[in-house]
């Protein structure tokens, strides 16, 4: 049966103008999954709405990476009970990383009776069938089986008309001991080079100016292809596509950050000079417990090589504070590497125990107060480093892609090639093209400047 066509018929009978509301939590890859699904639903005849109360179909795309992400998701799902009470015809679906976990899907089924169906990260292809069943039968369904991924149903729909996300690989084989991803996203698998390049061509032909290549472990791209293709080769071929656009990628693993990859980034102007390189901890003892497969020293060798090849390349990182067994000494090792590496930005997280991961069984002695205090100390240090780093850009000219308005009236905002937020006085006609900006002022989170007219 062609479910998509049948759904179109059914929903237009129920409502002449059916609408869909999609809320994605979590990382860019999950948001990209949500947009791909939204693209498929729009093709079925729905229109997108930002108003959850008037939607005919509501999709909550969940994230399981930390407990507070899950709490937020449960809060949102709970609230939907009132929406269903007011509009009993609405179909509510919950998908993504949380519902891939059998015990979570079971909990949702038993606790939130207003949810019509759940599906996991492998079952996007099954969505039309699940929606058809929800429209025609009145019983809860859940599909979190692990289907082989052939990527054939991937939809390129983007929310922005300037920046586009292109997933290139899914899953992760690294099994970092704190991380739920391998359990909810499965083993690593990569899309074919030709499919990715064709997506980039389609997007850039349609005016997109920035392509973000996504993967949970983006630089181990291509290991599962036959024959294997290194990530550096994919980047090179992508950067050789003609047109006025730039490429970023997220998130690489330090253990796969080889010199040939850094050399390619240095060689091609289309590849942004900004690398997000998750460190997680600066203590070798903790890195081993985390199963990260590198040491603080090998991490710093990569940082030094990046700086040598590309002096203006910025580096940002992820840090987990309070991993089980982290001592004051371990934490100070992290602070030491933060100072040495001079990150322009840090995404920091307090360790969150994830059932089913190896670290969940490790003894943990530090108190919540100690962990919060470590976090505060780290953020204070980072603010000092960022203030210093950002101040160095004053009086310099950066290339910026503006893509929206700033919170301050009269200013537009975008990101420089180096990944730094830049704001400048301007109107919407300056959006969507690369602009030269003279930096006039720095903060510890962004720069301000004036757009040069040439
Ligand atoms: N607790 C805290 N932070 C985590 N991350 C992943 N798993 C956990 C966890 N259990 C962080 C890592 C990763 C980022 C996406 O989320 O720093 O790089
Ligand atoms: Fe969250 Fe990880 Fe899933 Fe992304 S892959 S949505 S960060 S659990």
Image (tube, rainbow, N blue to C red):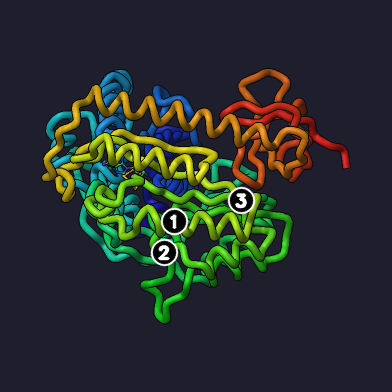
Q: Nearer the viewer, mark 1 or mark 3?
A: 3
Report if the CB atoms under discs 1 and 2 are less than 8 Å apart. yes
Q: Is residue 201 above or below residue 107?
A: below
Q: Quadrant of ligand 1?
A: top left
Q: State the SS at label 2.
A: helix
What number is the disc on residue 177? Answer: none
| Residue position marked by numbered label 3 in the rendering | 313
| Residue position marked by numbered label 2 in the rendering | 256
At horizontal 69% and vertical 59% (from top left) the residue drawn is: 269
Task: Locate residue 77 relative to residue 36 in the image: left or right.
Answer: left
At horizontal 34% and vertical 45% (from top left) the residue drawn is: 281
In the image, the residue with mark 3 has its CB under 8 Å from the nearest atom of ligand 1: no
Q: Quadrant of residue 429?
A: top right
The x, y position of residue 62, in whole percent, is 32, 39
Task: Locate residue 329 relative to residue 139 in the image: left or right.
Answer: right
User: Which of the two residues, 193 or 38, is positioned nearer the viewer here?
Assistant: 193
Report if the CB atoms under discs 3 and 2 are less than 8 Å apart. no
Q: Residues within 10 Å of mark 1 (few under 14, many from 20)?
A: many
Q: Name the residue furthest right.
A: 454
User: Which of the two residues, 304 or 124, is positioned nearer the viewer here?
Assistant: 304
Distance between the Cα atoms at labels 1 and 2?
7 Å
Q: State the SS at label 1.
A: loop
The x, y position of residue 324, in whole percent, is 19, 40
The x, y position of residue 227, in whole percent, is 42, 81
| Residue position marked by numbered label 1 in the rendering | 252
């Amino acid at each position: 049966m062609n479910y998509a066509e049948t759904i179109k018929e059914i929903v237009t009978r129920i409502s002449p103008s059916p609408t869909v509301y999609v809320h994605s939590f979590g990382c860019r890859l999950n948001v990209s999954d949500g947009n791909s699904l939204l693209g498929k639903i729009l093709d079925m005849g729905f229109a997108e709405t930002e108003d959850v109360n008037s939607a005919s179909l509501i999709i909550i795309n969940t994230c399981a990476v930390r407990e507070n992400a899950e709490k937020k998701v449960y809060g949102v799902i709970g609230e939907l009970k009132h929406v269903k009470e007011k509009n009993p015809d609405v179909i509510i679906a919950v998908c993504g990383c949380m519902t891939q976990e059998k015990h979570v899907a079971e909990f949702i089924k038993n606790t939130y009776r207003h949810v019509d169906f759940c599906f996991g990260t492998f079952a996007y292809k099954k969505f039309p069938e699940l929606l058809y069943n929800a429209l025609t039968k009145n019983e809860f369904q859940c599909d979190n089986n692990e289907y082989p991924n052939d990527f054939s149903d991937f939809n390129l729909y983007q929310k922005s008309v300037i920046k586009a996300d292109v997933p290139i690989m899914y899953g992760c084989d690294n099994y970092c001991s704190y991380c739920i991803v391998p359990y909810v996203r499965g083993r690593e698998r990569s899309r074919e080079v030709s499919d990715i390049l064709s997506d980039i061509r389609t997007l850039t032909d349609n005016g997109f100016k920035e392509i973000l290549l996504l993967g949970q472990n983006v630089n181990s791209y291509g290991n599962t292809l036959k024959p294997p293709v290194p990530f550096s080769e994919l980047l090179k071929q992508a950067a050789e596509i003609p047109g006025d656009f730039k490429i970023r990628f997220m998130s690489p693993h330090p253990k796969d950050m080889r010199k040939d990859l850094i050399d390619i980034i240095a060689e091609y102007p289309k590849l942004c000079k900004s690398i997000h390189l998750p460190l997680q901890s600066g203590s070798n003892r903790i890195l081993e417990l985390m199963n990260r497969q590198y040491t603080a020293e090998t991490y710093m060798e990569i940082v030094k090589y990046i700086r040598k090849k590309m002096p203006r390349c910025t580096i940002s990182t992820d840090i987990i504070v309070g991993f089980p067994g982290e001592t004051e000494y371990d934490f100070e090792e992290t602070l030491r590497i933060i100072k040495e590496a001079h990150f322009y930005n840090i995404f920091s997280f307090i360790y969150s125990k994830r059932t089913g991961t190896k670290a969940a069984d490790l003894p943990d002695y530090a108190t919540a107060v100690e962990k919060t205090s470590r976090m505060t100390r780290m953020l204070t240090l980072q603010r000092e480093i960022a203030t210093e780093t950002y101040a160095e850009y004053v009086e310099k000219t950066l290339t910026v892609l503006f893509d929206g308005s700033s919170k301050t009236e009269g200013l537009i905002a975008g990101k420089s090639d180096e990944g730094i937020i830049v704001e400048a006085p301007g109107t919407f006609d300056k959006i969507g093209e690369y602009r030269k900006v003279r930096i006039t002022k720095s903060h510890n989170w962004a720069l301000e400047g004036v757009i040069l007219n040439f």
